[in-house]
Image (spheres, rainbow, N blue to C red):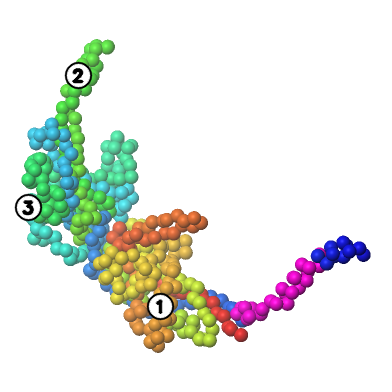
């Protein structure tokens, strides 16, 4: 072999030698960390909750939406709804300076009901009355508020007969019917002129700058159902409009001619919303609900029933101790909790008025309930959780309870016990507003509002004897 061929063979062999050298020096220190057995435990625990149905006769009825009407259902009971509300005033009256008090026609309050937002017979004739409040509403107001002494029953501001069906409209309005039904109530001309003059007076107009100053001269409204039974509507907004007229010259073809035109004066009408019920001011429902004998009998038989608005609620004890015991069965294992979910079967009670279950349910630690709603909190997945009703599975599924059980495990390790207050929960029907934020590969939904559900009558029958707990954790045994 020539010298050049020998050098070439040696150079080709060098990488192989280097690779063999590296393999000889590989350490086994790191590999010992992964030795051992990893198991994943996924338990489904079907449990009979220690639950009880409790009377919920008093509750916070302050909300932007309002219930109005009367209802009598054998399976549900009797419901009577009215409401009180302060009003938020517009800071300015944007009416042309050419309009004077003589041009003001009237003031009307308009109640808006979203189409389909009712329980009962939409053709049932109704009548309401509107009263002006004579003194300030109490800050601590609930569903049992008695308006007696807060208004003069001999001086109604307006009365209106109505139905919550578009069939009652005239033909042109029925054809153009949108998503809402309007209930206009004429409040007269005197109040309209008085308000107009106050806005035009620079000194008097100062009262409209702040809700507190406006409520001193006009404490608010009381709206009651004066006549009718068989229907309860959900009012989404309340607005008060001032109407006026003015003359406008309209270029019109002269009568009896083919191509001659002239300006003819026409009476035109316009309006502006000056007052409305808004979240910034106090608004509360007055609700009287008498539970039916049918539901009372179900409760006496051991059924767990929740009704709205008010009536019954359900308390229960979550089986946290059993889960903690399972998790800590072998303290030598390195364990990590993966998830904890909770599911409660629930169904509606058959009735002829399509009264269904509550759309959302809040599961909250009983000692945190009052604070939760008083401070307008949202579910934190530690002491409060929410679930939407699944009509296919007929159940409420509470997910994201991992943080809750982790805190209990830590507490049990430190104190050696779990107290009753940690596992006692109350189920509360709620109205939930959410906001979805899109990310790069996924989206996240956040709860922005969680309030007591006063949307419409509901009856929810819980099967607490067949509640399911889904608990999963991984374990690694170190060799």
Residue 290: image location, x then y, percent: 24, 66
Q: Earlier in the sequence, mark 3 or mark 2?
A: 3
Question: For mark 3, what is the residue?
Answer: 154
The quadrant of the picture occupied by the N terminus is bottom right
Other residues around mark 1 within 10 Å, as few (<14) / some (14–19) / many (≥20) = few
Q: Residue at x 36, y 70 (%)?
A: 384
Q: Residue at x 31, y 75 (%)?
A: 366
Q: Earlier in the sequence, mark 1 or mark 3?
A: 3
Q: Residue at x 40, y 65 (%)?
A: 387
- Residue 160 in view: no
Q: Which mark's residue is nearer the viewer, 1 or 3?
A: 1
Other residues around mark 3 within 10 Å, as few (<14) / some (14–19) / many (≥20) = few
Q: Residue at x 76, y 73 (%)?
A: 20
Instruction: Indicate left or right for 25 with 61 as reference.
Output: right
Residue 25: image location, x then y, percent: 70, 77
> How far apart, in angstroms, are the residues tagged by discs 3 and 2?
49 Å
- Residue 177 in view: yes
Up the image or down, 47 lies above or below 361; here it is below
Residue 166: image location, x then y, percent: 30, 43
Question: For mark 1, what is the residue?
Answer: 407
The quadrant of the picture occupied by the C terminus is bottom right
Element type at marker 3?
loop
- Residue 441 is marked as none
The furthest residue to the bottom? 416
The furthest residue to the right? 1
Write down the region rendered in magenta.
12-35
């Amino acid at each position: 072999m020539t010298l050049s061929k020998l050098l070439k063979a040696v150079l080709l062999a060098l990488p192989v030698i280097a690779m063999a050298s590296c393999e000889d020096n590989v350490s086994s220190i790191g590999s010992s960390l992964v030795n051992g057995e990893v198991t994943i435990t996924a338990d489904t625990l079907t449990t009979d909750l220690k639950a009880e149905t409790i009377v919920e006769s008093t509750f916070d009825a302050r909300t932007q939406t309002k219930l109005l009407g009367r209802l009598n259902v054998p399976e549900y009971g009797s419901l009577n709804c009215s409401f009180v509300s302060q009003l938020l005033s517009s800071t300015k009256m944007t009416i042309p300076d050419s309009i004077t008090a003589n041009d003001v026609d009237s003031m009307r309050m308009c109640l808006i009901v979203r189409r389909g937002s009712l329980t009962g017979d939409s053709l049932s004739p109704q009548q309401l009355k509107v009263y002006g409040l004579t003194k300030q509403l109490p800050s601590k107001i609930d569903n049992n508020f008695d308006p007696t002494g807060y208004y003069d029953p001999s001086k109604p501001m307006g009365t209106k007969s109505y139905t919550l069906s578009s069939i009652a409209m005239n033909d042109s309005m029925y054809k153009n019917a949108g998503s809402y039904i309007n209930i206009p109530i004429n409040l007269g001309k005197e109040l309209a002129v008085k308000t107009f003059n106050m806005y035009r007076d620079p000194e008097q107009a100062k009262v409209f700058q702040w809700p507190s100053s406006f409520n001193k001269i006009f404490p608010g409204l009381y709206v009651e159902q004066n006549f009718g039974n068989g229907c309860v509507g959900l009012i989404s907004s309340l607005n008060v409009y001032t109407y006026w007229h003015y003359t406008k010259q309209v270029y019109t073809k002269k009568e009896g001619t083919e191509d001659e035109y002239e300006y003819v004066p026409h009476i035109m009408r316009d309006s502006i919303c000056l007052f409305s019920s808004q979240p910034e001011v106090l608004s509360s429902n007055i609700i009287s609900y008498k539970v039916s004998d049918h539901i009372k009998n179900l409760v006496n038989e051991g059924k767990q029933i929740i009704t709205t608005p008010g009536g019954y609620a359900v308390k229960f004890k979550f089986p946290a101790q059993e889960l903690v015991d399972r998790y800590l069965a072998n303290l030598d294992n390195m364990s990590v909790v993966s998830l904890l979910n909770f599911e409660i079967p629930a169904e509606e009670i058959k009735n002829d008025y399509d009264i269904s279950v509550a759309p959302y349910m809040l599961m909250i630690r009983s000692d945190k309930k009052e604070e939760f709603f008083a401070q307008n909190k949202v579910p934190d997945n530690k002491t409060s959780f929410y679930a939407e009703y699944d009509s296919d599975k007929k159940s409420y599924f509470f997910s994201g309870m991992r943080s809750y059980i982790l805190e209990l495990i830590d507490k049990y390790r430190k104190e050696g016990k779990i107290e009753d207050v940690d596992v006692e929960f109350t189920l509360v029907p709620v109205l939930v507003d959410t906001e979805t934020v899109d990310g790069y590969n996924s989206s996240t939904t956040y709860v922005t509002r969680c309030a007591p559900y006063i949307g419409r009558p509901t009856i929810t029958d819980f099967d607490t004897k067949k509640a399911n707990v889904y608990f999963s954790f991984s374990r690694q045994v170190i060799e």
